[in-house]
Amino acid sequence: MNIQVSRITEPDIPGAITAIQKAFENDPYALWVYSDRENLSLVRNRVSLGNRCRWGMRNGLFYVAKDPDSVDPEQVVGVAMWMPPKAPGSKEGWSEWLSNWRLYFQQISMNLWYGRGGLNIKRYYIWKSKQAEAQSEIWTDEKGYYFLNIMVVLPDQQGKGIGRSLAQEITNKADTEGRKCYLESSRDVPNMKIYESYGFHFVKQIDCDDGGVICPLFCMVRDPKTIT
Ligand SMILES: CC(C)(COP(=O)(O)OP(=O)(O)OC[C@H]1O[C@@H](n2cnc3c(N)ncnc32)[C@H](O)[C@@H]1OP(=O)(O)O)[C@@H](O)C(=O)NCCC(=O)NCCS
């Protein structure tokens, strides 16, 4: 399979959103955080993901995968959004600060227009706080970590090496720079095996616990490979 990986552009965003929605349809974290299934709104979710994708385009290292030999060479078959490394304790810059506030106001106006769309706000903040706790404990390397924030491949395209091609875009760079990578997976099986094949290893399980309804997340780190 001849997979082409490139930085995301505005026309790729609808396809990226479709890939994210399809790949996360039965994801344990998505089912836990969007627990109000009666009010689940995929339309509201598309708007939210669109805001998030545009934020990622400005602040992250955001890639899409396409298959130029397929019937639809422009179709987004996979997505990977990484956050660049930051030294521990470093402050956010002005443009990041502005971008974060912009995303915050976009999400507020979206909530006013569409409602919560099935999102369980209490659980969202449980996850945020557990994530921050885990990252402050695990991210000890002075050089910072490339953080794989979103990684999906369309369900009918999984297992063909697309995830590997997307991951390598940054893992190769991390190897050259001697930097570590980090991710949180919402599935142990099969994802941990898949990520181990990209060079990650398991470091910690976080339990996002809402009164006994627990969503476990699996934190993994990848050490840089020595380049000879
Ligand atoms: C996780 C995911 C991104 C991996 O992408 P992918 O393109 O399917 O994975 P790859 O084809 O690169 O697979 C890499 C390796 O894992 C193996 N693998 C892939 N799917 C597997 C499965 N279901 N079970 C066991 N091994 C599997 C592949 O055979 C390959 O091994 P090899 O290099 O020895 O041949 C993709 O499966 C996905 O989108 N899953 C659903 C959404 C999700 O969970 N995202 C991650 C959130 S953290």
Image (spheres, grey):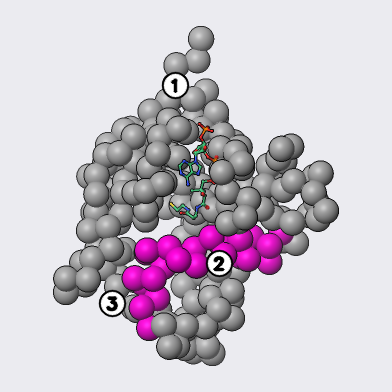
Residue 225: which disc?
1
Q: Amino acid at mark 2?
A: Gln
Do residues under tags 1 and 3 come within 8 Å of each other at their CB atoms? Answer: no
Who is closer to the viewer here, 87 or 82? 82
Residue range in magenta is 12-36
Ligand 1 within 8 Å, label 2 CB: no
N-terminal of the pair, mark 3 or mark 2, is: 2
- Tell me the element at label 1: loop
Q: Position of residue 209 (x, y in %)?
A: 20, 67
Residue indicated by mark 3? 122
Residue occupying the point 52% across, 83% down: 41
30 shown above or below 69: below
Residue 21: which disc?
2
Who is closer to the viewer here, 174 or 209? 209
Who is closer to the viewer here, 32 or 84? 32
Tell whether 207 sits left or right of 217.
Answer: left
Q: Position of residue 104 (x, y in %)?
A: 46, 72
